[in-house]
Image: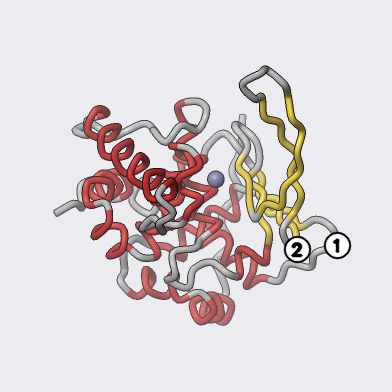
């Protein structure tokens, strides 16, 4: 039997600092859009936040990570994060090793700097530098990005299609996202700036994760650029709350 620790309440002073440093959290806290502070306390009771490489993570950092992580599940519930337990935090960007198979079947190994990673049924990995750069209403949010991958992985490998709620239509989701993804790639091919960060054009999974960052950070930009995607994300992240 798996017993969950009872959540410890987040200290008033720490929470005020979290809200001061991360305007996005303050915005949702003040809007009363879901009990983000108590959800963050429950997140900390259920997950282990593990600083590595000698990183000293202060309570503001821990609570900020928890609060940012809880924004996507404000209306869904923490159960959406069942099945994994740790958030590993590096001081800065970390090198990730990957491999790619080219058209000739040759496997190329590479290393690249990452601000975050989400493993299927494994940990979420974050760089604290990237966490600090998140939550300032400019469209970048590594925590929301990785948590979106986690939601996407609830039905297998990340492919930009998380399990949808009753009443949502998988075909409508797919059409909205594939049209927007194709548009982003057309922009890049034509040497133009796509409406969302370039990284969205990497794959359908990255498009969903980046669009999720915009949904919380810069909803107007997302709504103007890709209204159909906005509507799908609104139905997904705020079930029952859509206009
Ligand atoms: Zn990603």
Q: Circle 2 is placed at which residue position?
A: 91
Q: In this image, 127 relative to 45: left or right?
A: right
How many discs appear? 2
Q: Looking at the image, which residue is at 23% across and 31% down?
A: 166
Can you give x and y, in whole percent of width and height, for residue 72 in the image?
Answer: 41, 52
Residue 70 vertical position relative to residue 135 in the rendered view, above or below: above
Q: Looking at the image, which residue is at 73% across and 53% down?
A: 50
> Which quadrant does the N terminus fall into?
top right
Q: Give the numbered dot on residue 25.
A: none
Q: In this image, 180 relative to 159: left or right?
A: left
Please identify the residue farthest to the left as the structure is shown. 243
* Nearer to the camera, 135 or 200: 200
Q: In this image, 48 relative to 71: left or right?
A: right
In contact (CB < 8 Å): disc 2 and disc 1: yes
Displayed-image quarter of ligand 1: top right
* Nearer to the camera, 130 or 202: 202
Where disc 2 sits, the SS reads loop
Q: Circle 1 is placed at which residue position?
A: 54
> Which quadrant does the C terminus fall into?
bottom left
Q: Looking at the image, which residue is at 63% across and 45% down?
A: 117
Where disc 1 sits, the SS reads loop
Can you give x and y, in whole percent of width and height, for residue 9 in the image?
Answer: 54, 66
Residue 84 vertical position relative to residue 220 in the rendered view, above or below: above
* Nearer to the camera, 183 or 238: 183
Q: Nearer the viewer, mark 2 or mark 1?
A: 2
């Amino acid at each position: 039997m798996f017993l969950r620790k009872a959540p410890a309440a987040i200290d008033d002073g720490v929470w005020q600092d979290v809200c001061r440093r991360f305007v996005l959290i303050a915005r949702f806290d003040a809007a009363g859009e879901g009990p983000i502070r108590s959800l963050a306390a429950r997140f900390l009771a259920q997950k282990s936040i593990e600083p590595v490489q000698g990183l000293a993570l202060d309570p503001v950092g821990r609570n900020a990570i928890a609060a940012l992580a809880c924004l996507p599940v404000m209306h869904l519930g923490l159960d959406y994060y069942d099945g994994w337990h740790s958030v590993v935090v590096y001081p800065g960007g970390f090198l990730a090793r990957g491999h790619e198979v080219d058209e000739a079947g040759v496997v190329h190994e590479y290393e690249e700097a990452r601000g975050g990673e989400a493993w299927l049924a494994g940990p979420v990995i974050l760089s604290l530098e990237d966490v600090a750069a998140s939550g300032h209403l400019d469209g970048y949010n590594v925590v929301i990005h990785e948590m979106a991958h986690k939601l996407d992985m609830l039905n297998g490998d990340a492919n930009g299609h998380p399990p949808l709620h009753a009443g949502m239509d998988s075909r409508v989701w797919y059409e909205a996202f594939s049209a927007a993804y194709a548009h982003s790639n057309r922009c890049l091919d034509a040497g133009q700036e796509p409406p969302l960060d370039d990284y969205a054009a990497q794959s359908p999974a990255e498009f969903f994760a980046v669009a999720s960052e915009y949904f919380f950070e810069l909803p107007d930009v997302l709504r103007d650029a890709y209204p159909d995607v906005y509507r799908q994300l609104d139905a997904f992240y705020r079930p029952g709350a859509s206009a």
